[in-house]
Amino acid sequence: MALPALGDATRFRQLFARAVRTTATGFALDPAYFPPRVLTSGYPRTSRRFVVETCPPRRPDEPLQEVHQDLAAALQKRTEQVMLHLARRARSRPPARPRRPYAPSTPR
């Protein structure tokens, strides 16, 4: 969890702004960076474009490099921005109407 604190978010700020856009209804992931099948096993979680614009995947036995710290910092920053956007959006919406409690069913 300390990795983002060690990096420079400005290096990949624009990339994450393009890849994770805020919208009027929330946010959207750009499939050019994050393929839509990320939750299905056997598919890559990031696209070739993401790798080209950032760095190749790091193997577990490889040491962390500055680029990994910068990626972590930029992703953390964008996540915070998107969460604040969602919180502001939720706050600006009118409260939902309270639901009526369901009436107990009566035998016919």
Image: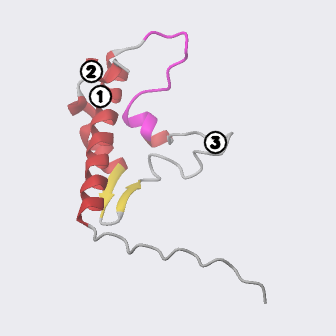
The x, y position of residue 54, in whole percent, is: 38, 32
* Viewport quadrant of the N terminus: top left
- Image mark for residue 5: 2
| First in residue order: circle 1 vs circle 3 | 3
Are the residues at dot 2 and dot 3 in contact (C-beta closer than 8 Å)?
Answer: no
User: Does the CB distance between marks 1 and 2 fall below 8 Å?
Assistant: yes
How crowded is the residue under tag 2: few (<14 C-alpha within 10 Å), some, or many (20+)?
A: few
Q: Secondary structure at mark 2?
A: helix
The secondary structure type at the circle numbered 3 is: loop
Whether 57 is drawn above or below 40: the answer is: above
Q: Amino acid at mark 2?
A: Ala
Amino acid type for the residue under numbered disc 3: Tyr
Indicate which disc, 2 or 3, sits on the residue closer to the N terminus.
2
Q: Please, what is the three-letter code of the amino acid marked with disc 1?
A: Ala
Compute the Cα span from label 2 to label 3.
Answer: 30 Å
**Residue 86 shown left or right of residue 104 in the figure:** left
Q: Is residue 56 magenta?
A: yes
